[in-house]
Image (cartoon, rainbow, N blue to C red):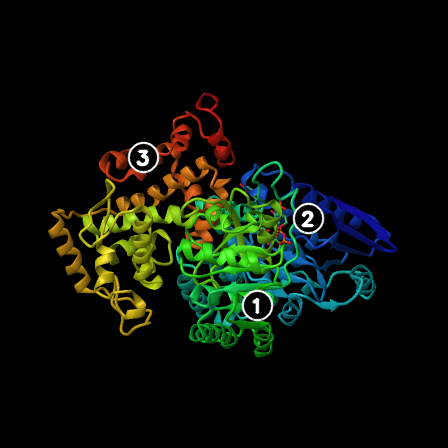
Amino acid sequence: MVDYRTVKSVAVLEVNNPPVNALSYNVRQGLQDGIERANKDKEIKSIIIIGKGRTYPAGADISEFSKPHKGPNLIEVGLGIESSRKPVISAIHGTCLGGGLEIALFSHYRIALESAKVGFPEVALGLLPGAHGTQRLPRVAGMAFAMEIITSGRHVSAREALQHGILDKLVKGNLLSESLDFAASLPFSVPHNRRLRNVPAKGAENADRIFEVALNKVKQKQNGFIAPINCLKAVKAALLPYEEGAKIERELFMELLTSGQAKAQQYVFFAERAATRWYVSNEKNQKKCSAVPVKTTGVIGAGTMGSGIVVTLLRAGLPVILVEQDSQNLERGVNMIKGILQGSVNLKRMTSQQMNKCLQQLTPAQSLDSLHNVDLVIEAVFENLKLKEEIFGKLDEICKQQTILCSNTSTLDIDKIARATKRPDKVIGTHFFAPAFVMPLLENVYGTKTSGETIATVMNLGKTIRKIPVLVKTCHGFVANRMLARYQTEASFLLEEGCLPHEYDQVMEEFGFPMGAFKVGDLSGLDIGYRIRQELAKANGYTVTTDTRYIQGERFSSLADKLYELGRLGRKTGKGWYKYDRPGAKEAFVDPDVTDIILKHCKDAGIIRRKISTQEIVERSMYSSINEGFRCLEDGVASKPEDIDVIWLHGFGFPRYRGGPMYYASTIGLAEVYDRICYYHKTFPESSYWVPSDLLRKLATSGRNIPMSDWSTAATVNKSRL
Ligand SMILES: CC(C)(COP(=O)(O)OP(=O)(O)OC[C@H]1O[C@@H](n2cnc3c(N)ncnc32)[C@H](O)[C@@H]1OP(=O)(O)O)[C@@H](O)C(=O)NCCC(=O)NCCSC(=O)/C=C/CCCCCCCCCCCCC(=O)O
């Protein structure tokens, strides 16, 4: 895993552990052995550490964190490098991250290609750079920069790293030959100040203030995460003598390593990658099916969703024809797109030049005919099956044979939409989350006849437009909204039984959601839910009024509809579940009028309110959703629990340090979750979604701890095999 060779008087240690040269046990051993061997060889004057293939080591091997420790650890390897009598040069290309950057900082010199990136992303894994990274970075780059880099985990360009003293030299062309020239220019021994332990941390004079500012920032931006706080404490310890600082770093690292948060965040790292690997059948899967190129696109509908989707496509460099029949709506949509892009310029996320380039790629149009030659169309009109069927029928006539037809429906059956065309194999759902230009999730929804090629194309498109694509099977609400419906319904029942909106939201925000269900409701607009309920009623042949208490035997809360009918549509009208200073304002205030509405609603319905515990709020919100998640696995709508977790993390802001609802259930224990679901089923027999999922029952009562990787298989085998 580490190839040792000599080039004249230089020992070259080439790390060869594809795909990212992670510092697995064999790599660590190979580096340690290589340094020792080079130091013993009288012919060798200096040592180069370099990565084979696409990168310098991109960090420790994350999969080893959950396994028993083996071989020399990274600190032992690093100390061996630092104490080498012969100069060690790290020659960096690709992504030099985490433990990789630590190895580089133990080295005496760092030389890099201009395209290289460096960084400490450990914080995203619930960790800190525990092989003295927190002690060494402030010694080269200063306290302030070290705190920023280590708590954000951002990848720093080689040029910026050079400016901050992390790198000694940037080179172009052949990294190895440049490094050999560099090695030839060095003295034979290692100067005192090239061993970073001998250098004091920079910025010591302002350290307290820097620490306080950084601490406030992480409390605000990374609320609930423990790793960023430990990162800061560890960097601050770099002011102490080296060994003392390293000891503190070790204690803080071990605290994180054994915490539930780190385990959850490492699970998420692999879950996100697993979600992009899709499998429908032996014929339709990621390995067998290739994407077709998408060079031109069309979007139908210039409303909020359509405009957000257009921005996402334009930012990825794709030309878009935006179709909206009504000229005023089209103009409004184009202005919205310009406004969003200008916002990115104002935030320095793009230059004016880039914005203009995007806008040149946008063609507004009023007729579907203009889409005849595009490779892929995304329909983003109002959520109405008839309307969508009509549009898809027309698109089928207009578009070239190869065009893939996507619907941004959030609930409707893709098979029904596909039936309106003569190309059901080329019809698929691409469900974006609002705001579409911000939210990272893309829930791709295949129908019975969707081809593997079409699936591969939209999964690929997801990556191109920098979203996290997850594939699910069609059904009402798919995975995201099907599960969310349980969460929202329970929230509304909890209001009837004793909570107020701000009390509920506070509990779920403390659980880790960025906003509680009622603040989210105000943000999306109460008219959205109202329309969906009315459509659903129409489609199923019943009516819903503000007096409705039961629908087809199921408990129903009409509180949201009462607010809607009072014109309380949320932020946009300045009042909803909360009140706001003015329409569109962000800060929510408790509204005594809402309390009165809720109390009157309960009195009229004869509901006796009670005090509801935090535990009950969390359990009813999460366990009802988790039960539905198990049903999605059971039905094959979701193919693995990781997909469900990624959907919640990136679609609904589920706290990353809890891993996702399915992972969260595994940490509670399925037997416990199942027991509580049985209890709520007994308590609320008029909400049939509390009937425990068969799959959950099987897993929970099997008498053993079945790992998440086996849950999907368990959905298809009979109980006796568990
Ligand atoms: C940017 C990337 C590097 C590349 O991105 P991309 O090109 O898009 O590729 P991906 O799809 O992401 O990845 C390709 C595949 O590689 C797998 N992968 C990637 N990185 C790793 C990794 N670090 N480990 C394992 N596997 C990895 C990935 O899963 C893909 O696999 P597949 O194709 O899906 O199968 C991007 O990959 C990226 O960002 N990677 C992660 C970078 C990262 O986070 N690095 C930091 C890792 S953590 C670290 O380095 C920590 C160091 C501190 C160690 C402290 C040691 C202290 C020792 C003392 C304590 C010892 C304990 C003793 C016990 C006691 O004392 O009691």
Q: Earlier in the sequence, mark 2 or mark 1?
A: 2
User: How many numbered marks appear?
Assistant: 3
Point 81% across, 52% down: residue: 11
| Mark in front: 3 vs 1 | 1
Q: Nearer the viewer, residue 292 or 251?
A: 292
Identify the disc placed on residue 19: 2
Would you call the spot at circle 1 few (<14 residues within 10 Å), some (14-19), or many (20 or more)?
some
Residue 488 visible in image: no
From the Cβ of disc 2, is ligand 1 less than 8 Å away?
yes
Instruction: Find numbered disc 1 in the image and state the secondary structure of the residue it sits on.
Output: helix
Image height of 517 relative to 314, above or below: above
Would you call the spot at circle 2 few (<14 residues within 10 Å), some (14-19), or many (20 or more)?
few
Would you call the spot at circle 3 few (<14 residues within 10 Å), some (14-19), or many (20 or more)?
some
Q: Nearer the viewer, residue 70 or 329?
A: 329
Measure the C-alpha gap from mark 3 to mark 1: 50 Å
Image height of 679 relative to 235, above or below: above
- Based on the displayed image, in which of its 4 quarters is residue 118 positioned? bottom right
**Residue under numbered circle 1:** 370
Q: Amino acid at mark 1?
A: Ser
| Mark in front: 2 vs 1 | 1
**Residue under numbered circle 3:** 691
* x and y, in percent, of residue 7 in the image: 86, 54
**On the rendered structure, is 526 left or right of 630?**
left
Asked if the residues shown at circle 3 and circle 1 are in contact, with their CB atoms under 8 angstroms apart, the answer is no
**On the rendered structure, is 556 left or right of 33?**
left
Q: Amino acid at mark 3?
A: Val
* x and y, in percent, of residue 227 in the image: 47, 54
Q: Amino acid at mark 2?
A: Pro
From the Cβ of disc 1, is ligand 1 less than 8 Å away?
no
Measure the C-alpha gap from mark 3 to mark 2: 45 Å
Instruction: Find numbered disc 3 in the image and state the secondary structure of the residue it sits on.
Output: loop
